[in-house]
Amino acid sequence: PVYRATTTAPVNIAVIKYWGKRDTTLNLPTNSSLSVTLSQRSLRTLTTASCSPSYPAEDTLNLNGKPQEIQSSKRTLACLSNLRALRKSLEDADSSLPKLSTFHLRIVSENNFPTAAGLASSAAGFAALVRAVADLYQLPQSPQELSRIARQGSGSACRSLMGGYVAWRSGELADGSDSLAEEVAPASHWPEMRALVLVVSAEKKDVPSTEGMQTTVATSELFAQRVSSVVPERMTAIEDAIRVRDFPKFAEITMRDSNTFHATCLDSWPPIFYMNDVSRAAVRLVHDINRAVGRTVAAYTYDAGPNSVIYYEEKDSELVAGTVKAILGTNITGWDGPFYEPLANLT
Ligand code: DP6
């Protein structure tokens, strides 16, 4: 027999950024972070996990049609061995269960967006991998418990196992058992929230985030302050803003945290640049729109790449998405589109 499970996982975009590890083996962060999970209609990873006694030799992983070197990926191996151990304990407790933990796995994964272009593909990818194998193994663990495993694949992946507004609590314990994702509010709490993803460049990013954050931790003088006081204060403030659906406050914290994160990149030695001229044009445009309207209707944020994500509320669609598309879509060179449609959050 072949046992099989298929699942999808969404992309999440952080508004308080994860940047820095306190433990690179367990993938534990230096600070807590918070993200918004985007709709799977536009951006998602689709993954099928299967296993069979007839599968030969070793576990395999295929991403967007290309076989991946799974044996050299410590992160993938860590996720799979954690999941296998959970399955094994189910089998030990109930001898009537098929011994799936002893079969080789075949994992086939596909993104509907450019991989490694700063569009959080590793987040959706590892979340989908963990979810698919957990489903295949019929594991009883909650999304929060699975977030501990996904985190070891890619930090940001732990936030893609839940919808809505998700915090990744950095935790304090050395074994990482308290470094977990937690839902702050479901998407339905703020149904007006929208995100527009502007693909400034679909090319692979310059400095992979894992490497970039290590450089920042080791060399940036601004970084210590970000971790000790800036982020903890912003986490509390943005959770309050989400609770009362205060868009201007949510927006200001989001933009400031993106800017602080990129400032620590610039403060790294040698400096790291993720945003480009088009990214900066979008930043100026958002500030121009907010100033012209006389209230904060839009917020930008940038991950480890030049693409913008712009948050706004449905009632301001024309104003924000309309203006951004009209101005940046036609007037900026170096733009290689396409725009993704505005996304409703995931429920
Ligand atoms: C800028 O989760 O890709 O997107 O744990 O090394 O895989 P690893 O890093 P990753 O870093 C994401 C960094 C970020 C901010 C964020 O998503 O919080």
Image: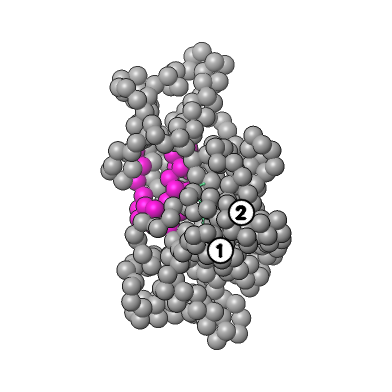
Q: Which residue is mark 2?
A: 33
Residue found 52% across the figure and 29% down from its top: 82
Which one is nearer the viewer's eye here, 271 or 51?
271
Q: Position of residue 334 (x, y in %)?
A: 33, 73
x 55%, y 41%: residue: 24
- Residue 230 has which mark? none
Could you tell me which residue is drawn at 56 percent across and 63 percent down? 267
Which amino acid does the dot numbered 1 rest on?
A: Asp
C-alpha separation, residue under disc 2 versus residue under disc 1: 20 Å
Instruction: Give above or below for 84 relative to 183.
Output: above
Name the front one of labels 2 and 1.
Answer: 1
Residue 82 visible (yes or no): yes
Label 2 CB less than 8 angstroms from ligand 1: yes
The amino acid pointed to by label 2 is: Ser
Circle 1 packing at 10 Å, graded few (<14), some (14-19), many (20+), is some
Q: Is residue 320 a member of the stretch shown in magenta?
A: no
- Residue 267 - label: 1
